[in-house]
Image (spheres, rainbow, N blue to C red):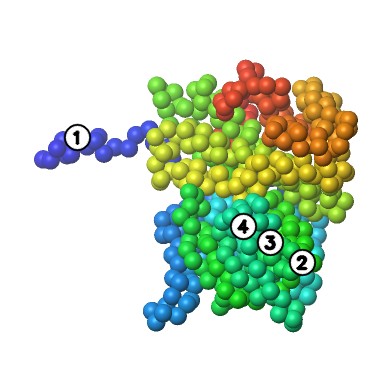
Amino acid sequence: MTLLDAHPQTRDVLNQASPLEPVHHFESWAALREAVDREGGGWGVDRLRDAGELAGSPQAREHSRRAERNEPRLDAYDRYGHRVDEVQLDPSWHWILRANIERDVHSLPWREERSGGHVVRAGLFMLMSQINAGVMCPVSMTYAVVPALRAGAREIAAEWEERLTRPDYATGALAGMAMTERQGGSDVRANTTQATPLGDGTYELHGHKWFCSYPPCDVFLVLAQAPAGLSCFFVQRGPGMEFQRLKDKLGTRSLPSSEVEFRGIRGRLVGEEGRGVPAIISMVNHTRLDCLLGSAAGMRRGVLEAVSHARSRSAFGVRLSDQPAMRNVLADLAVESEAATATALRMARAYDSGDESAFRRFGTAVSKYWVCKRAAAHAAESLECLGGNGYVEDSGLPLLYRDAPLSGIWEGSGNVMALDVMRAMVKEPEALPAFLAECDLALGGDARLDAHLRDVKDGVGGLTSGAGDLQERLASAQFGARRMVEDLALALQGSLLVRHGAPAVADAFCAARLGGGGRVYGTLPAGVDAGAIIDRVLPA
């Protein structure tokens, strides 16, 4: 008899959480279902059910694990010394990306030009993000390039849009972008990449880009200095576009991000020469929307994992989910997730409406700043709910934690977004009133929100209608830009939840987020209905 035969309980597995998968991400996500219907995307429910079932399957989770574990590799040369610039990717990466393309996550609003197209697509994006965040980068850029081409290069759009929106992974095309350089970063006007006109309507590009997302893309939008100034160019991948290395990143490690050198590759102008930033801003605004969607999706994943774990595991003889302190944390994480989901879908609806351009631009910047800024702390708290188990890679929470900061950096870090909001107050005087009008739709619904809205209006009113030059007042207010944008974001989230959210969620949000409150998650005040809030995360 061996020692293990004498003590068989040594290998008993006790008090461990049950596997979450399979889980139907759409059916179990009450806030998403409600928001999709409310914002005009009810016609896409069958698509969303299909995506939610796939995303929550054990098969999808294993593909994500494989894609993260087997990181991409750049082969710059073939065995004979010829330049090839090929990126080797695990088959699981292709499985996940193909699943997105076949479900129109990269193209739905452009192929189905009907009311609610951006809302349905937003729901699909958030559901498919539950599989792997890195894959969503080429999906997002391909979606976002279409409006930029339609606005600034109709001939190119006519030539390429069908391929860019085709729901076929083998024969369709993907789009990327290359804007930032090592000396400029967010200051793209400091770019040194040169574009020389060749006299036939094309330009020859020479220079280096510090970040070029997803090198296997077929086409890219590139910023470069033309004779009239910084301009935007449409570039097809090929000889003269040489990838120098893949970035060794904190998160989204399944996604190959690169440095690229242009050595005489041809480009075609998008927009006017010297107007590169306005030409590419349409693409940037749409990818900013996806940063918001991705962060909201990550919050949902974190609180779902936390609630599932807490309902399965006990401490001191009581289930974690029944411990008062843990219930506060879980409910607080759920409130944040619901606020982000409501905001994401409302902003997606603004992209469906031709009458909301002012609100869309301003609201995207405000919401992108706040929701993406909250995502990293949310992921950390979700991980902590699992304790030591959450710190282990197999739980999936370390991946969520590493990926969470990306959307706060990509397409404008916190300071860039906050200053963008302030600039919009100057350049688009109709933007702030449109945003506040949306928030005002909840007036009278909760006294705490009413008070917050009064404070917000007093604060921005001192900037926009005070004495002296408006630009000078805004410049002097930059030190407090983040606080101002935070207050605006909370006003929008509070308005959406008071109007449309579950009563328990709206009450907890106003109690904890408006007029002061705790500094970390798990500091909801007494009296909130934690049980009702938690049950909306995952029905018991």
Which residue matches tag 2? 228
Amino acid found under the numbered disc labelled 4: Thr
Image spot of residue 349 (x, y percent) = 78, 49
Mark nearer the viewer, 3 or 4: 4
Task: Determine whether label 2 and label 4 are within 8 Å by CB.
Answer: no
Q: Using a 10 Å C-alpha cutoff, classify the residue at mark 1 as few (fewer than 14 neighbours), some (14 to 19) or many (20 or more).
A: few
The vertical placement of 500 against 530, above or below, is below
Q: Tell me the CA gap for discs 2 and 1.
A: 81 Å
- Horizontally, residue 483 falls left or right of residue 294, namely right
Q: Residue at x 59, y 58 (%)?
A: 181
- Horizontally, residue 58 falls left or right of residue 415, namely left
Mark nearer the viewer, 2 or 1: 2
Which residue matches tag 4? 180
Q: Residue at x 60, y 29 (%)?
A: 332
Which residue matches tag 3? 143
Task: Determine whether label 3 and label 2 are within 8 Å by CB.
Answer: no
Q: Tell me the CA gap for discs 3 and 4.
A: 20 Å
Image spot of residue 292 (x, y percent) = 66, 46
